[in-house]
Image (cartoon, rainbow, N blue to C red):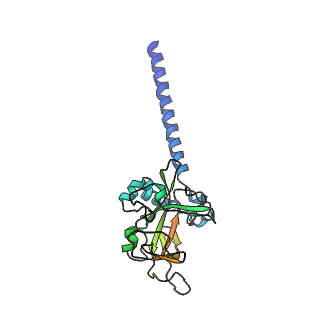
């Protein structure tokens, strides 16, 4: 009798653990799906509702940069403010981009500056690979830890003297990735200090040395939902401390 009873208990126990494993797997998949923004939730992006595979490619290629140290190891440079310690990752030493007019932000730009400064103009992606965007964008959590929210492609303009497309017409670069065909924004003046850069740029009425060059750029909010759209410059859910 006890043998039969023990066998029943054992079968029920195994069945219970099997159910727990299945529920756990479903929960894990659900959590991953929730953590990965859907293109359909990114505002006016209906034309890309069938391009989820392309966005998944981008997430797979850039997911390692959730660890900001990995981004630094791969050549992405922290946006250190002029006069601050370049080895410090303290947010107070870094430039965080926020637009009070739009009440939206971009966050901290960790940029592969070498590729932009030394690569060919109009080359999309590090080494010409669009799955390797030139910038990783982060915001900081309450504990100060960096959280990856977006990627950005940055293309140096051929002409470094004029950003007016009416007086200086240039071809508009675009992201070409599978079903995605998205034009860049720009051209525009640089908006950050880049130590060692040979370019100058305006910040108000005063020209700044060691500056980000005139460029085109394109953001993709693949790690953080953006009600303004997946390719919009600004995200109302991203702020600066």
Q: Is residue 127 visible?
A: no
Q: In this view, does 27 lie to the left or right of 86?
A: right
Q: In which quarter of the image is the C terminus?
A: bottom right
Residue in the image at 37% along x and 69% along y:
114
Please state the horizontal and vertical placement of residue 209, each as a whole percent of the image: 43, 75
Residue 228 percent coordinates (x, y)? 62, 63
Across and down, in percent, residue 230 comes to 56, 63
For this view, does 119 lie left or right of residue 98? left
In the figure, is residue 204 to the left or right of 117?
right
Question: Considering depth in this image, is 207 or 124 the residue closer to the camera?
Answer: 207
Farthest-out residue, bottom: 167
Residue 192 appears in the rendering? yes
Name the residue: 44% across, 81% down: 158
Q: Is residue 20 above or below residue 168?
A: above
Image location of residue 75, percent across then percent down: 37, 62
14 to 135, vertically: above or below: above
């Amino acid at each position: 009798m006890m043998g039969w009873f023990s066998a029943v208990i054992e079968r029920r126990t195994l069945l219970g653990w099997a159910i727990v494993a299945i529920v756990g797997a479903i929960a894990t998949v659900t959590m991953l799906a929730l953590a990965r923004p859907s293109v359909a939730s990114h505002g006016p992006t209906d034309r890309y509702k069938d391009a989820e595979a392309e966005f998944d490619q981008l997430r797979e290629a850039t997911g390692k940069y959730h660890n900001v140290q990995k981004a630094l190891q791969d050549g992405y440079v922290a946006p250190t403010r002029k006069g601050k310690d370049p080895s410090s990752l303290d947010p107070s030493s870094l430039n965080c981009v926020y637009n009070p007019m739009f009440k939206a932000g971009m966050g901290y730009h960790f940029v592969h500056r070498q590729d932009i400064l030394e690569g060919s103009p109009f080359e999309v992606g590090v080494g010409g690979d669009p799955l390797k965007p030139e910038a990783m964008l982060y915001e900081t959590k309450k504990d100060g830890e960096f959280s990856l929210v977006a990627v950005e492609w940055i293309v140096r303009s051929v002409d470094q003297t004029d950003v007016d497309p009416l007086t200086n017409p240039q071809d508009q670069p675009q992201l070409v990735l599978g079903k995605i065909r998205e034009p860049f924004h720009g051209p525009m003046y640089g908006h950050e200090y880049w130590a060692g850069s040979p370019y100058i740029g305006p910040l108000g009425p005063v020209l700044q040395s060691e500056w980000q060059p005139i460029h085109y750029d394109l953001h993709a909010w693949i790690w953080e939902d953006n009600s303004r759209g997946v390719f919009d410059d600004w995200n109302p859910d991203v702020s600066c401390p």
